[in-house]
Every structure is written in structure tokens, then in C-alpha cells.
Amino acid sequence: MRFLLFLTAASAAALLHTTACQRNVAVTTPTDAPQTGLAGSVSTPAPTSANTVEPTPDNQPAFDDRKRPKWLEDRIQQHLNEKKANPPIHIYSYQFNGATVYYETSPCCDQYTTLYAADGKVLCHPDGGFTGRGDGKCADFSKNRTEEKLVWQDPR
């Protein structure tokens, strides 16, 4: 222990350098010149001939352009007359058990979503609620639904 106290900084550095070299460890300091001649560790890649810019998606959603049933138009108008929900309400159409159905999201936490038949009758609440599993009347909806189309979303 006393021996280490009397070592000078130069001899300590030499001892450390010798130990590091014996283990094949390169000792460098931040003041060493870059090996590649570049100041940074990453170089700018060469330009490519292909276009690398991703197109910006259109902010306007692509709604299902089929004519909406009257009851659904009334439901949409009802949402527009209410205060904007957070998150915004979305309505999707699906094929489920051989029929067209409409799925309406819930405005927020622990509330049921609603699944409507094509005639506007409420079929069930497929998810939401305290458990997140809905009312249990159509537990197979998320597995068996097909042909998702966005019918409407609150634009506000």
C-alpha cells in the first residue's frame, strides 16, 4: 500500500499502460486525434439515386363512401350537437356474422363501445366497461369481424 503512495503520476500511468497492453486493451484519451481524419464518429452517407422521402399522409380520413342509413346520420348529428369527446368518436362498418354492422367507439375511459345492426338496433357492447370486455354478448366480435371501413370520425 505504501509503495503505491510513493509512485509518481508518470510511473502510475506507465504501470497502468503496461497492464492494459498485457490484456490487449487500447488506452486512448479524448485528446487523441481521430483515426479516420473526421471530427465526428459518424460520416454523412453518400446520396442514393432512389427517392428516400416518405410521402406525408393525408390528414383527411378516407371515409366509407356508401350511403349511410338515416338512423346513422341522426346519430352522427347527435354527436356533433354534443361537446367534443376526448378521444374523438369514430364509427366503423364491418362484416360480422354475414351482416353489415356499425361499431361506435366510446368517448372515454371505462365506457362501453356500441355495436349496431344495419337497421340501428343495438346488438351488444363488444368492449369497454370496467373489465374492458364489454357486456359479453358478442365476445367473438374482435376475432370474427372483417372488412373494416371508417364511416365517420368527429372532425372537431
Image (tube, helix red, strand yellow):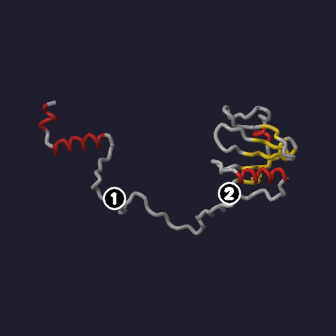
Most foreground residue, 145 or 156: 156
Image height of 134 relative to 156, above or below: above
Most foreground residue, 25 or 22: 25
Q: Which residue is mark 2?
A: 155
> The disc labelled 1 sits on which kind of residue?
Pro
Q: Position of residue 108 (x, y in %)?
A: 65, 42
Most foreground residue, 107 or 1: 107
Secondary structure at badge 1 equals loop
| Label 1, label 2: how far apart the Cα atoms are | 55 Å
- Give the position of the C terminus as an image quadrant: bottom right
> The disc labelled 2 sits on which kind of residue?
Pro
Disc 1 packing (10 Å; few <14; some 14–19; many ≥20): few
Disc 2 packing (10 Å; few <14; some 14–19; many ≥20): few
- Residue at x 20% of width, y 44% of height: 14
Q: Position of residue 12 (x, y in %)?
A: 19, 41
**Viewer-side label of 1, 2:** 2
- Residue at x 73% of width, y 41% of height: 113
Secondary structure at badge 2 equals loop
Image height of 34 relative to 19, above or below: below
User: Within the image, what quadrant is residue 80 found in?
Assistant: bottom right
Q: For residue 34, which numbered disc appears in the image?
A: 1
